[in-house]
Amino acid sequence: MTLNPVAADVRLSEAIADLSYSRALEAAGHHDLTLGLYGVGYDWRFRRAVARALVEARGQGRLLDLVALDAAGRVLGRATDGGLSSRGSTYEAVDGHQRMVALYAADEWRFAPDWRLDWGLRHERAALSAWVERATTVNGGDPATLADDRIAVGSGIWDRRRARIARTAATLALHWRASDRLGLFTRATHAMRLPDPGAFRIGSGDAVRALSVEQAELGLIWRRGGAGLDATLFASRFPDIALPDLSLDPATGAVQVGQHDATARTLGLELSGHASPRPGLALRGTLTWQDPRLRHYRFADTTGGTPVVTDLSGRMPRRVPRLMASLSASATLPGTGWTLDGDVSAMGRRFADDANTLALPGFALVDLGASWAATPVLTLRLRATNILDRIAVMQGDALGGEIRAGASDGVITVRAQQGRVVAFSVDWRL
């Protein structure tokens, strides 16, 4: 099979400042008010080169050479070079900069003995800029192989990209303490995430945008001694998402990055509980069920020279499950300095593509750990993740089709979670 080995170099220099002021005051009730100013500036350097390699489809697969022979068995030429069918099919270089400032305010207003109103505002303004190097192709000069005929390298020509963007996030929640053990709340939130200079990588020019999230919640909180349960009904809407679409140029093998516009929504229920049945023992679990759906997801493809409109509205977004769950436990052994812990995380069936043609099976992973506080300053820890060495498929092949998954003779390529890993660490505090 053909793989796309990647070499990348990413460097970041960043400075962050946060100035906040908090004050309690009385005005038609009790207020805990917070005001703040936040600023960040960073320089980001990104370089990436992608090759193409012919590899055996097996564990620890070897690189394969494709060689042309004459009738006498003499080598006439090679389609590969040391297993590489292209020493450089894709080249990317971006030097990005971002400056962002945010003003925020929040208040917890207890206007009655059992009632509280929480609100928060955050306004962000960002200036993005980047220099993006154009790629060109060169011939490596080896006539005995085709692998170096078109090597993607930097051209030395840089294009400037700039964008300014501002957005405001807000949240408002009403809490009612119905009894000493029971509380109810409702919350409405408009959140956002501003883009970063990496958005210029996809060749979208200056057309960068923020991601918005609108969410409504209705929740219940119950507490009794060392036990508690939270239950939250939620509805979320994503009005302006851009779904990436990776593909390979059939002529050069270069990675092409595009995007399709869509909206999405999800309805769900989240349960979270914790308990301490005895001193030193803690249990915690979460369970989330949701129904995520794409909306207004239409795009045009060309088939046989004829434009064909595809409508994937109503499908589930790629890699988003309906069901997720986790359970963790930790126990401290009195007088020994030992702490034992373990957790199980599970994820239900998802789809590798937006067309929902390739289903990814659900899985459960088990992690175990132990730590020993040998002295007040020295702690030893042993941790085993995915101890059962399960093959947990996380996503399909991005280059094989995330809009509509591709398959060759019934064979698919997927990406799995890392297998069993055992780590030992020493923590020494000065």
Image: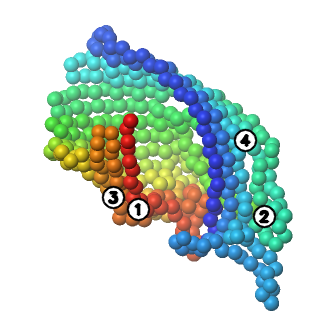
| Residue that badge 1 annotates | 420
Closer to the camera in the image, 383 or 22: 383
Q: Residue at x 55, y 45 (%)?
A: 262
Q: Mark 2: few, some, or many residues within 10 Å (few <14, many ≥20)?
A: many
Disc 4 element: strand
Disc 2 element: loop
Nearer the camera: disc 2 or disc 4: 2
| Residue that badge 2 annotates | 148
Mark earlier in primary sequence (3, 1): 3
Whole-angstrom CA distance, mark 4 to mark 3, is 43 Å
**Amino acid tagged 2:** Asp
Q: Residue at x 77, y 46 (%)?
A: 134
Q: Please, which residue is most extreme toward the bottom here?
A: 72
Whole-angstrom CA distance, mark 3 to mark 1, is 10 Å
Mark earlier in primary sequence (2, 4): 4
| Residue that badge 3 annotates | 366
**Amino acid tagged 3:** Val
Disc 3 element: strand
Residue 292 position in % (x across, y down): 43, 49
| Residue that badge 4 annotates | 132
Residue 150's disc is none
Q: Mark 1: few, some, or many residues within 10 Å (few <14, many ≥20)?
A: some
